[in-house]
Amino acid sequence: MPENREVLLFTNRFPFLHGESFLETEIVYLAKAFDKVYIYPANSGSEYCMELPVNVHVLSPPGPAEMPLRQLLSRHFLLFIQYFFYELMASRHRWEYIFRFRWNFYHWVGLLRQAVAWKNSISAHASRPLLYSYWFNDTASALVMAKKMGMTATLKTRVHLYDFEEEFHPRGYIPFRYSEIKSVDAIVPISDYAYNYIRDQHPRANLTRVHRLGVTSCPASIQPSGSPLVLVSCSSLSHYKRPLLLVDLIAHFTQPVVWHHFGSGSMEKEFLEKTAQLPDHIHFHYHGHVSNPEIYRFYENHPVHALINVSDFEGIPVSIMEAMAFGIPVVACDICGIPEIVNQKTGMLLEKKFNPAIEAEKICTWLSDFQQRESERGEIQQFQRINYNAELNYPRFMFELKGYEKN
C-alpha cells in the first residue's frame, strides 16, 4: 500500500478562534508526519488561533449539493433503503426510525446532500486520499455516506465522548450510527471508556487501540502556601459543564479562596450573575476565553492549589492534562473517562450527584493534607509524562494514522 503523503483533516472550528484549541499541539505533529495537511473546518471565523506550519492549508468545505429532492432520491434510493432497513434490523433504537420517521428522513437527506458534495470535491483532490475526522460527527457521517456512494478514500476518525455516547444526545440516539460505523476504516478512541463503549455497542466496528491525547510536559508550578486557597476552573460555560453547581460548591468553602475561571459559553450571563453573589471571603476572577499559551503562562506564574471540574459528561479533558503537567492536583466527578486520569495519586473524585456543602468541606480537608506532601506534585507530573505526554502519544498516533500499526 503506498504511503500517504498528505492528509485531509476535518474539524468543527479549528484553526479559528474558539475552535478545538487542544489541536494546537497535534497539528505540529501532523505537519511533520505528512508533506501536506489540508484542514476543512465545518465552521470558520475571521482569525486563526495560532500560526500554522507552512505545509498546513485551510480550505472551505463544499456546500450541500443543490439538487431537487426527487432527483436526489431517485439516484440514491437504494442507499436510502439500505440505511433505514439496517437501522430497523440492527439498532436498539429501531422504533425511533418509525415514530420519528419524518425527522430521521430529513436528517438523512441533509447528510446525503453533503455526501454528494464531499464525493465530488474529494474525488477531484486525489485518487485515494487519507481522511482524518477529529470527531465522529455529522461531517464524518457524510464522509461515510460518500464512501458508500463510491468515493475511494481511507477514513479514520477519533472518538471522544459526545460523538459516540448516545445517551448524551437529546434524542437518546445518534441517527444511522449502526449503518455507518462498520464503514469507517479506523475508529480511534482517546480513552478506555470510549474503547469499551464502542466495543460493547458495535462489535463489528473497526476499532483501534486507545490513542490518548497529550500535552507538552512543563516545569512544576510555584508551590502554593496555606491560605488563601487558589482554585482554577477551565471549561466552557455550557449546561453539561454545570457551572452554576461549581459556584454552589465554591461558595461553601469556609476559608479564604481566590478563584480563577477560564472559558466562556452560552451560560456566561447566569454564571457571572451567580458569582457576583459569592461570600466576601471568595475572590473571583473571570478570564473568559483565552488561548492555551495564556493558560500555560498563568500556571507558570501563579501558585494553584487545585483545578476543579464538576461536569456530568466528560471524555478526558485536555484542561486536566495541562494542570497535571504543572503538578497541580485535580478535583473532578467520577464519570466517563475521568477516573482514567484522576485517581488517588493525581487528585480527588466526587460523586456525580454531590452535596456542595459536604464536598466543599471534604475538598478543604483533602487539600490541607495534600499540601503537607510536596512530593506528590512530582508524582502528578510523572503520571502526565507517562500517560498524557504529547511527545510520546502523537508520534504513536501518526503511525496509526499512516497505517503502520496493526490492531
Image (cartoon, rainbow, N blue to C red):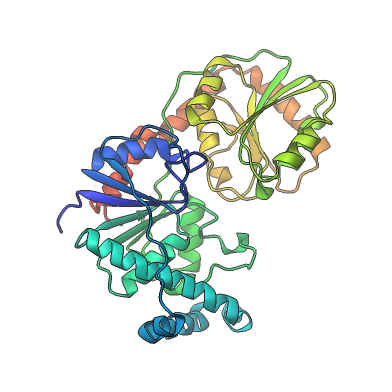
* Res 260 → quadrant: top right
Could you say where residue 289 lies in the image, as x and y percent from the top left?
58, 34
Q: Which residue: 71% across, 14% down?
A: 226
Could you say where residue 222 lies in the image, as x and y percent from the top left?
56, 14
Res 372 seen here: yes
**On screen, residue 304 above or below 60:** above
Q: Which residue: 65% across, 17% down?
A: 372
**On screen, residue 128 above or below 102:** above
Residue furthest left as drawn: 2
Q: Nearer the viewer, residue 114 or 366?
A: 114
* Res 168 → quadrant: bottom right
Res 183 seen here: no
**On screen, residue 330 above or below 86:** above
Could you say where residue 101 lies in the image, as x and y percent from the top left?
58, 81
Could you say where residue 327 lies in the image, as x and y percent from the top left?
53, 24
258 on left or right of 178: right
52 on left or right of 377: left
Image quadrant occupied by the C terminus: bottom left
Give the number of marks: 0
**On screen, residue 139 above or below 52:** below
Q: Which residue: 63% across, 38% down?
A: 264
Q: Nearer the viewer, residue 297 or 226?
A: 297
Image quadrant occupied by the N terminus: bottom left
